[in-house]
Image: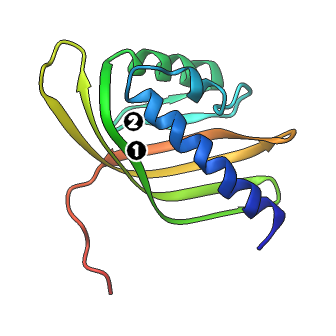
């Protein structure tokens, strides 16, 4: 296993914790892992997208404000890799959260692809694609 892969696996614990804070309405931990320098992009579960590091971070901050609390958040990583200063993970993000103004919890089951680049000694999120999981495909 490469040093990049080992380092990225450790980093993914921080990334998952940041996602947990996000669905509780706190974007600050995510701010520690998102790219501050373009290029950066976000393809949201609503079907729209944002580009540019500043615009992406602004969108993350705004969207986190829609969450009030969460009782669960976890990643199911299907595969990941890190090499030559780039890394990715592909999988599912499952969360149960309450949105501001709602008393009922909502289950989120998202298909996720995230891409990271190394900036100095840190991994930074440069692209996130999230959309709703409709059903599990049959494995072949």
Q: Is residue 107 above or below residue 8?
A: above
The reply to whether residue 5 is in sight is yes
x, y percentage for residue 74?
40, 48
Quarter the N terminus occupies: bottom right
Question: Does residue 88 appear left or right of residue 93 in this picture?
Answer: right
x, y percentage for residue 23?
38, 29
x, y percentage for residue 38?
71, 29
Q: Please name the residue shown 67% across and 48% down the image.
A: 11
The answer to whether the residues at label 2 and label 1 have Cβ atoms under 8 Å apart is: yes
Q: For the residue carrying disc 1, how many other residues have a C-alpha within 10 Å: few (<14), some (14-19), or many (20+)?
A: many
| Distance in Å between CA atoms under marks 2 and 1 | 5 Å
- Of 123 and 38, which appears nearest the observer? 123
Q: Which residue bears the numbered disc 2?
A: 44
x, y percentage for residue 69?
31, 24
Q: Which residue bears the numbered disc 1?
A: 130
Question: Does residue 100 appear left or right of residue 32 in this picture?
Answer: left
- Of 96 and 116, which appears nearest the observer? 96
Q: Which mark is residue 23?
A: none
């Amino acid at each position: 296993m490469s040093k990049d892969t080992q380092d990225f696996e450790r980093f993914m614990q921080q990334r998952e914790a940041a996602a947990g804070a996000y669905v509780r309405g706190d974007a600050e931990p995510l701010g520690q892992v998102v790219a501050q320098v373009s290029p950066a992009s976000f393809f949201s579960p609503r079907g729209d997208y944002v580009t540019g590091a500043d615009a992406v971070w602004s969108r993350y901050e705004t969207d986190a404000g829609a969450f009030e609390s969460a009782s669960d958040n976890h990643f199911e990583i299907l595969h990941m890799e890190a090499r030559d200063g780039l890394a990715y993970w592909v999988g599912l993000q499952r969360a149960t959260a309450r949105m501001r103004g709602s008393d009922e919890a909502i289950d989120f089951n998202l298909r996720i692809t995230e891409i990271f680049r190394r900036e100095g000694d840190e991994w930074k999120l440069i692209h996130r694609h999230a959309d709703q999981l409709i059903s599990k495909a049959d494995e072949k």
